[in-house]
Image (spheres, grey):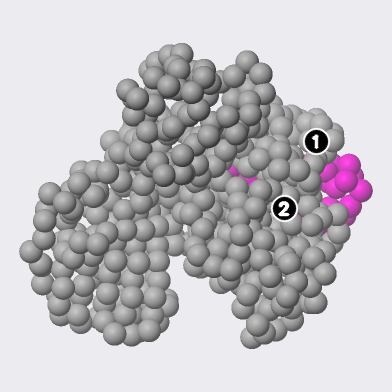
Amino acid sequence: SEIYFTRCSGDPLHLQTGVLATYSSSSKSNRLNPKTLLHTTKMYSCIPQHLFLHFHFASSPNTKAFNSSMRHTSIRAVSTTENSIPAAPIFLPEGPWNQIPGGVTAADGFKAAGIYGGLRAKGEKPDLALVTCDVDAVSAGSFTTNVVAAAPVLYCKRTLDISNTARAVVINAGQANAATGKEGYQDVIECVESLAKLLKIKPEEVLVESTGVIGQRIKKGAFINSLPTLVNALSSSVEGADSAAVAITTTDLVSKSVAIESLVGGTKIRVGGMAKGSGMIHPNMATMLGVITTDARVSYAVWRKMVQVAVSRSFNQITVDGDTSTNDTVIALASGLSGLSCISSLDSDEAIQLQACLDAVMQGLAKSIAWDGEGATCLIEVSVTGANSEAEAAKVARSVASSSLVKAAIYGRDPNWGRIAAAAGYSGVSFHQDLLRVELGDILLMDGGEPQLFDRHAASSYLRKAGETHDTVRIQISVGNGPGRGQAWGCDLSYDYVKINAEYTT
């Protein structure tokens, strides 16, 4: 079996003496004694081009044997799922919640599974995922703004228009089923009917998400033939959630899954989720799929509004390459099994608390997508203050995070304040340039609309260290004295982005 450590730290990985492990990457595989590793080698689990430390064992490992020193490193995620890929680090905002295991299955009433169903080439990753709810779950969705919307997107929109609840979300990887005409839409209907029959629910209680190559219809035969195995694999365990999170990935190098627990109105509730995305990512939903679950009880009108707000603060605030996909979908289900009284007003304290939890989960997943951007070496977080409104602050942040010149400068370890200022200026938000302030980490680059003297070597080192350890580059911008605050997330633009997308068909 194997354990994947995903870590964003430049320190040596400290292992307990006596545990033998194998380090493998695309270029080498060596058997190492951790005692030697500790004293002679610095090896990173999050480095450029996403090379991860993989420790392989002849028998089931005891994670306590690693005895990692928290003074030197922090383990962000651990995955032991078979045929898995490393799990992404999840960057949750601070708040009154605790991160817990489980992803989409953490909330009461939910099960999940991911299997290989023959939709990808033989020997590749799992390609079929399913999330179900034991009861009628209040449903909501957010979809691509691309007018060339895929068949599953059109199906989900129409289904949510006629039904306030759902019981299942099925996701396939391999074929996007976009630009496939009436035949592609009919494929969705037939797949839905087959799954509904197996689950003994109504077809309108099944929602569908697809990712893969545009112009290719779902491999309907393989899809339908795999459904009995998929249904039998359903589990409320962490493993069920992990397997589903892996099955929905495409060019992703890490899976994205998270869950939190918090008190809402004095009742313990859970919110979990999974997402996929690595390229074709741009504000207004990009190539990303997501499923969010909670056991909070909430009216459908309030839930749908909450989901739209959370999406606007998270998935609509990430960018990798400026391309908006045909298939973007986020489905959110609320089982109501926590025992919480029904939230029916957006102005209630309970609604505000649940909104914060929903925002946190979606932002954590969104940032992990940007962190996993194709060819990226670091996450970029742009924070804007002083705008007239939250919407204006978010618009400025998106503009800077989306700038190819800013992204290229960060990859080149160039603290180019001019590109940041220019991107803020063409955002479409009006502000007085003599109030513009720009900081990179804790280094002041610009103030009062004018460049400041700063230690260029220190600023370049800050960018270089972030790239070497796949860490976060933080850009803080102030555009005035208003109350509006907003954030956006992106990644740097490397040579590998071009290489990846030149070799991969979308």
Q: Quadrant of the N terminus?
A: top right
Horizontal side of residue 78 vs 218, given as left or right: left
Circle 1 residue: 233
Circle 2 residue: 106
Q: Which residues are magenta?
A: 188-214
Callout 1 environment at 10 Å: few (<14), some (14 to 19), or many (20+)?
some
| Picture quadrant where residue 78 is located | top right
The reply to whether callout 2 and callout 1 are in contact (CB within 8 Å) is no
From what the image shows, is residue 354 above or below residue 56? below
Q: Secondary structure at mark 1?
A: loop
Foreground: 371 or 277?
Answer: 371
Horizontal side of residue 45 vs 431, given as left or right: right
Horizontal side of residue 99 vs 105, given as left or right: left
Task: Looking at this view, name the residue that lies furthest to the front.
Answer: 17
| Picture quadrant where residue 354 is located | bottom right
State which mark lies toward you, 2 or 1.
2
Of label 2 and label 1, which has the lower sequence position?
A: 2
